[in-house]
Image: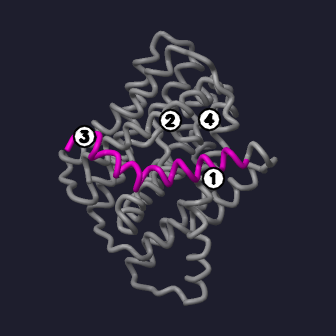
Amino acid sequence: MSILQAILPIFAATLLPVFLVAGLGALLAGFIDLDERTLGRVIFYLATPSLVLRSLYQMEIDYGALQRIALVAVLVAFTMGAVAWLAGFDQARGRRAALILTGAVSNNGNMGLPICFFAFGAPGLSLGAVYYVVTSFLSNTLGVVVASAGSAPLGIALRNSLRAPVLYAAILGVTLNRTGITLPTGLFRAVDLLAGAAIPGMLVLLGIQLRNAPLRQSDPLIPRAVAIRLIAAPLLAWLLTRMLGLSGLTQNVVILQASMPTAVMMGVLATEYDAAPRLVATIIFFSTLLSMITLSVVLWYIL
């Protein structure tokens, strides 16, 4: 059996549903004036925190493994950010900030969580949620500082990040899990209903965001950023998981999450702080498009 023959069924079962739903979101946005901001807020404040809470509440937690997952997520983000800084050394400050943003932070929510679920089921989703919480915190703190080229104080960025409900959902989920406290049936069902809306909502929103992205036709930084995000990051994650003794499902989920394309959130930050927003949007678009190939290879390797 050739590699292509082995990869195609993996793509069809795991990645195709993700890109189909995102594509439907993009298609719908072409016919209907959808309020991207409102949908994003519903997902951000209700659906995603519920998904994280449910996942961590129900999972069998190895706290040593959780710490190592968080460490890998931090090391991958910082190392890829440093590589991007070096790769953009000859660029103006705003363009270098754009390269760092797109190289350091991956789309572990909108894409990572659905793909972890389709590839590994509920256990993979729970582990993927841990990685996502860490990178979400980083994007809302250090991401703001990078996008603003240092003009936004870290303290302000940190306070903004502490407003993110997903952080408190993760803390609550781990606390309930560790103490053995059982949520009342009615409350858990409400959380479960909201959590069920997270993955399809994320994918529809991803499609809308990609459709609305203001693109540049060409730029020499685009291939640099895409290579850092889709090739260097998963290789580093593979190395780090081996060094830290992660194996099996945990290792596979970490590598998969590190392989995701650039986070759409980076486009929001680039626009807010004028860090070459069209360049960032183009990198997000192409890294997401090309990830159909690279993620297929990664899944073929780890499955």
Residue 39 screen position, x and y as percent: 71, 55
Judge the density around disc 1: few (<14), some (14-19), many (≥20) Cα neighbours within 10 Å.
many
Name the secondary structure under disc 2: helix
What is the secondary structure assignment of the residue under circle 1? helix
Whole-number angstrom distance, CA of label 4 to CA of label 3: 34 Å
Towards the viewer: 209 or 144: 209
Query: Circle 3 — which element?
Result: helix
Of the residues under marks 2 and 1, which one precedes in the sequence? 1
The CA span between labels 1 and 3 is: 31 Å
Real-space CA distance between mark 3 and mark 2, rounded to the nearest whole angstrom = 20 Å
Which image quarter holds the N terminus? top left
Instruction: Name the residue type under label 2.
Output: Leu
What is the three-letter code of the residue carrying label 1? Val
Magenta span of residues: 1-28
Task: Please name which of the two marks, 2 or 4, marks the residue nearer to the observer.
Answer: 2
The quadrant in which residue 275 appears is top right
Tell me whether the residue at label 3 lies in contact with that at label 2, contact meaning CB atoms closer than 8 angstroms.
no
Magenta segment, principal secondary structure?
Answer: helix
* x and y, in percent, of residue 98 in the image: 55, 26
Q: Which amino acid does the dot numbered 4 rest on? A: Gly
Q: Which mark is residue 204?
A: 1
Q: CA distance from mark 2 to mark 4?
A: 16 Å
Q: Position of residue 61 (x, y in %)?
A: 32, 71
Q: How is the image coloured?
A: one colour
Whether residue 24 is in magenta: the answer is yes
Residue 289 numbered mark, or none:
2
Q: Residue furthest top?
A: 90
User: Which residue position holds label 4?
Assistant: 267
Q: Residue at x 39, y 37 (%)?
A: 293
Which one is earlier in the sequence, the residue at label 1 or at label 3? 3
